């Protein structure tokens, strides 16, 4: 008898009929003798509808009350899922974040889970009940409702699986697994049977919204094996875990695109020691989460510093950014919200050369200019003009032979064939 967490996303609980079909799936797991904890999202579109109501009241509505409002989407789904199970003859009960309790910090709208009280859930399971948990929500030390950031029901599911020591955490969604790229953008994309936590974390943080980034952070930290499965089709889906399988690794596993960033450039800044600190320290105090940073070679003692920030924050942060620019005597500040970040990801990059060269060649062959580049051990990202993002993703997907038509190259084959280099640690370009 296993303990299984099963999470159903917005489209999978989008109508009463779908909640019923999801309940059938849960009931089948329970009938097979397993203990089941179900985590539900709000019905598709509901969180956006509630957020719009909040913004119709005020341009910047009270953050804590926004969380009370948007948490209701998951409350409704949890009750309906419990009712569907009860109607099918299965004892079930729903829990809201504060009833378990899922303790979080007080960052309303993007709270972090700090701890989970397991006892109420375990007691209900011991009574033979199927437990339904409203995803996306928690409670802070001030006894107020919090939410975990968009896609946060994934995080609830993985954190619960970790706290309960569950055997599996199944994420049921509207695709049958994690693909080499967003299947809605790249029709040729293939399902990947297995990914490491590390690869999935890069994918999630670089735009693959199939799993919320924080859910993967929890999975990695607590070594939770996560399966991504289609809610209403059978299949093996994608297993995300800590295992690095030498046999199956390709150099590049996935291509992603992130379209929610903006670029800011400080031009003509006097180039002296400490200049970066005097720019980024006040920006971080103002709550700016800076991502990529590029500093140009200085000319006549002046340099340009370019960095990216979340696009949603741009408007709110501009006054602070302009203040900082004045403080460091920048000649000019430019901002550009029409950028996108395309990335190639794969643990095989650690040991294989040639990925960067191949990426840059593929983009330049279709005339896409790279404005900024950043790398980590297992990914390379380029900032490009937003209008080229879909083209860039498709071109890179082809360049690394990730599609259905071509057989995937075994790890390293492509780069070895091209450059005849022995595997080198961290070598990519
Ligand atoms: P849910 O509502 O179930 O949480 P999401 O919409 O959050 O579902 O995530 C599923 C969607 O993620 C898919 O419909 C797909 O368009 C998108 N997606 C983006 N990148 C990928 C990828 N690499 N593999 C699979 N799906 C992806
Ligand atoms: N309902 C929330 C959202 O739309 C959380 C989730 O679906 O995971 O972001
Ligand atoms: Mg989601």
Image (tube, grey):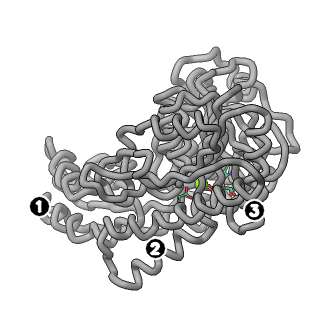
Where does the image place residue 259, in percent across and percent down from the top left?
53, 61
Q: Is mark 3 within 8 Å of ligand 1?
A: no
- Work out whether residue 311 or residue 369 is closer to the camera in this orientation and state it: 311
Q: Dot 2 lies on which element?
A: helix
- Residue under numbered circle 3: 18
Q: Which one is earlier in the sequence, the residue at label 3 or at label 2?
A: 3
- Residue under numbered circle 1: 327
Q: CA distance from mark 1 to mark 2?
A: 36 Å
- Residue under numbered circle 2: 51
Residue located at (78% from left, 57% from top):
21
- Work out whether residue 112 or residue 354 is closer to the camera in this orientation and state it: 112
Residue 45 falls left or right of residue 311: right
Q: Which residue of the protein is positioned furthest toward the right in this rendering?
A: 405
Q: Determine whether 269 is above or below 154 in the image.
A: below
Q: Which one is earlier in the sequence, the residue at label 1 or at label 2?
A: 2
Look at the numbered discs 3 and 2 and tell me whether their residues touch, using CB distance below 8 Å: no
Q: CA distance from mark 3 to mark 2?
A: 24 Å
Where does the image place residue 208, in percent across and percent down from the top left?
60, 50
Viewer-nearest of labels 3 and 2? 3
Viewer-nearest of labels 1 and 2? 2
Where does the image place residue 416, in percent across and percent down from the top left?
71, 22
Residue 85 falls left or right of residue 61: right
Residue 15 falls left or right of residue 76: right
């Amino acid at each position: 008898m296993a303990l299984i967490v099963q999470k159903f996303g917005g489209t999978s609980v989008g109508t009463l009929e779908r909640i019923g079909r999801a309940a059938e799936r849960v009931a089948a797991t329970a009938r097979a003798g397993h203990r089941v904890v179900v985590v539900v999202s709000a019905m598709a579109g509901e969180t956006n509808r509630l957020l719009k109501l909040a913004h119709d009241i005020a341009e910047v509505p009270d953050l804590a009350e926004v969380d009370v409002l948007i948490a209701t989407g998951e409350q409704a789904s949890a009750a309906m899922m419990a009712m569907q199970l009860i109607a099918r003859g299965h004892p079930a009960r729903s829990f809201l974040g504060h009833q378990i309790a899922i303790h979080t910090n007080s960052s309303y709208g993007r709270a972090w889970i700090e701890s989970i009280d397991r006892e109420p859930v375990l007691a209900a399971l011991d009574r033979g009940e199927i437990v339904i948990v409203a995803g996306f929500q928690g409670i802070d030390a001030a006894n107020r409702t919090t939410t975990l950031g968009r896609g946060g029901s994934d995080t609830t599911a993985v954190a619960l699986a970790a706290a309960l020591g569950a055997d599996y955490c199944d994420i049921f969604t509207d695709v049958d697994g994690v693909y080499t790229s967003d299947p809605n953008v790249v029709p040729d994309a293939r399902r990947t049977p297995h990914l490491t936590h590390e690869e999935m974390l890069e994918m999630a943080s670089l735009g693959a919204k199939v799993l919320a980034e924080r859910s993967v952070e929890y999975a990695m930290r607590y070594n939770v094996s996560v399966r991504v499965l289609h809610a209403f089709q059978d299949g093996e889906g994608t297993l995300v875990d800590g295992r690095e399988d030498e046999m199956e690794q390709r150099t590049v596993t996935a291509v992603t695109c992130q379209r929610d960033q903006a670029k800011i450039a400080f031009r003509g800044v006097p180039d002296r020691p400490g200049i970066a600190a005097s720019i980024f320290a006040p920006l971080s105090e103002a709550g700016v989460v800076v991502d990529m940073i590029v500093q140009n070679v200085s000319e006549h003692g002046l340099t340009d510093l370019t960095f990216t920030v979340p696009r949603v924050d741009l408007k709110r942060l501009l006054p602070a950014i302009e203040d900082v620019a004045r403080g460091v005597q920048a000649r000019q500040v430019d901002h550009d919200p029409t950028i996108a970040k395309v990335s190639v990801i794969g643990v095989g990059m650690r040991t294989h050369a040639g990925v960067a060269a191949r990426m840059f060649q593929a983009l330049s062959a279709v005339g896409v200019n790279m404005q900024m580049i950043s790398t980590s051990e297992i990914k390379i990202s380029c900032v490009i003009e937003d209008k080229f993002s879909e083209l860039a993703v498709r071109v890179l997907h082809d360049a690394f032979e990730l599609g259905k038509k071509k057989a995937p190259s075994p790890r390293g084959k492509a780069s070895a064939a091209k450059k005849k280099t022995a595997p080198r640690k961290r070598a990519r370009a």
